């Protein structure tokens, strides 16, 4: 069975939150999705964290065993001669709705296909390390 997990980017405190691992925030599934509550906050208007950006776990791991989440920046390398036709570079992991799979932007290949060959490595994410993706665009 595929493991369903999320993490959340807090764009107010500029930090990544891992659901189930935070001491000061409780995550629950409500009628409209995930609801995050800051249990240390006394002010009722600030208890519910409406500003979080939720990122889903793809169910896949990179070549080092690191979990890959939506919004991660991955480096794809062409490490074998038989893969000469596969583009290399950096891209953002995103859900490609039209075809129903996780995609790596700018490389235009499905994440699963790239992982099958074992040459994908998480190097950051778009919130904490946006310069990694910008650097790859500047070099082209």
Image (cartoon, helix red, strand yellow):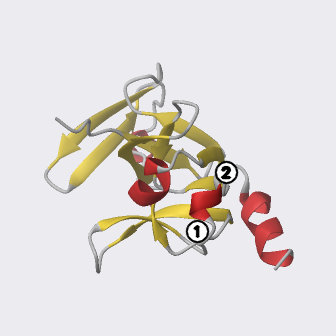
In the displayed structure image, the side of residue 82 where residue 54 appears, left or right: left
Q: If the image is split into quadrants, where does the C terminus sit? A: bottom right
Q: Residue 68's spot in the image, x, y percent?
A: 48, 44
Closer to us: 52 or 93: 93
Closer to us: 46 or 2: 2
Outermost residue, top side: 23
Tell me the SS state at disc 1: loop
Callout count: 2
Which of the 4 image quarters holds residue 95? bottom left
Q: Are marks 1 and 2 in contact (CB under 8 Å)?
A: no
Outermost residue, right side: 139
Query: Which residue is tagged 2?
Result: 79
Tell me the SS state at disc 2: loop
Q: Is residue 44 above or below residue 119?
A: above
Residue 126 visible at all: no
Q: Residue 118's spot in the image, x, y percent?
A: 53, 45
Q: Is residue 115 above or below residue 62?
A: below
In the displayed structure image, the side of residue 113 where residue 13 appears, left or right: right
* Residue at image location 20% in from the left, 42% down from the top: 29
Residue 86's disc number = 1
Q: Residues within 10 Å of mark 2 (few under 14, many from 20)?
A: few
Q: Residue 25's spot in the image, x, y percent?
A: 43, 29
Closer to us: 18 or 111: 111
* Residue at image location 48% in from the left, 31% down from the top: 41
Q: Residue 4's spot in the image, x, y percent?
A: 26, 40
* Residue at image location 72% in from the left, 64% down from the top: 133
């Amino acid at each position: 069975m595929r493991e369903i997990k999320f993490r959340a980017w807090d764009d107010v405190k500029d930090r990544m939150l891992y659901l189930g691992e935070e001491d000061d925030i409780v995550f629950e599934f409500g009628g409209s999705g995930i609801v995050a509550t800051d249990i240390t906050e006394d002010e009722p208007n600030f208890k519910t964290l409406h500003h979080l950006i939720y990122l889903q776990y793809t169910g896949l791991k990179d070549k080092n065993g690191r979990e890959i989440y939506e919004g991660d920046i991955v480096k794809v390398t062409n490490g074998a001669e038989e893969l000469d036709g596969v583009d290399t570079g950096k891209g953002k992991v995103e859900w490609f709705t039209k075809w129903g799979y996780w995609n790596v932007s700018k490389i235009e290949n499905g994440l699963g296909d790239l992982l099958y060959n074992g040459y994908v490595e998480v190097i950051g994410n778009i919130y904490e390390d946006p310069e990694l993706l910008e650097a790859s665009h500047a070099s082209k």
